Amino acid sequence: MATSDIQARLTRILTAEEAPIVDWPVVDRLCDELDRDLDASSDDIPEIVTHFLSDSDIRARDASYGETQRDAVRTYLATGDYFDGVAVPWWGCFALVAAVVGAIAWALA
């Protein structure tokens, strides 16, 4: 499936969700259709897109979650960038290493 087609269809979904009165059954249908087409194409799709397509029911209930997902998809559409994980600060990695080293030192003592 062409990237331009995916982008156009995601834009159509965003437009439908940002209408003054959202027709959620239409949004669900658009998401389901794109999701089926992407599954059939076996293209490598960013996780943010697959989550966005499967979470329309959650976005309908939770405006804050919906805005967060729409922002992530807008960023993906505008820049091609996306983040599919949880950011771990450097000090978190250091703390984990220190804990493991401390546990090994305690076990050997």
Image (cartoon, grey):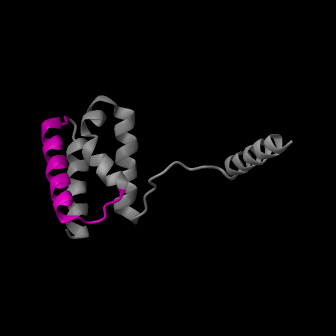
Q: State yes or no: residue 88 in magenta.
A: no
Q: Main secondary structure of the magenta part?
A: helix
Q: Which of the 4 image quadrants contains residue 81?
A: bottom left
28 horizontally vs 79: left or right: left
Residue at 44 percent of width and 53 percent of height: 84
Front residue (pair 25, 103):
103
Residue at 68 percent of width and 46 percent of height: 92
Front residue (pair 91, 71):
91
Q: Which of the 4 image quadrants contains residue 60?
A: top left
Q: Position of residue 58 (x, y in %)?
A: 30, 34
Front residue (pair 104, 54):
104
Q: State yes or no: residue 30 in magenta.
A: yes
89 horizontally vs 65: left or right: right
Residue at 17 percent of width and 36 percent of height: 24
Residue reaching furthest top?
61
Q: Position of residue 29 (x, y in %)?
A: 13, 44
Q: Position of residue 59 (x, y in %)?
A: 30, 36
Q: Which residues are magenta?
A: 21-46
Above/below status of 82 relative to 25:
below
Quarter of the picture containing the N terminus is bottom left
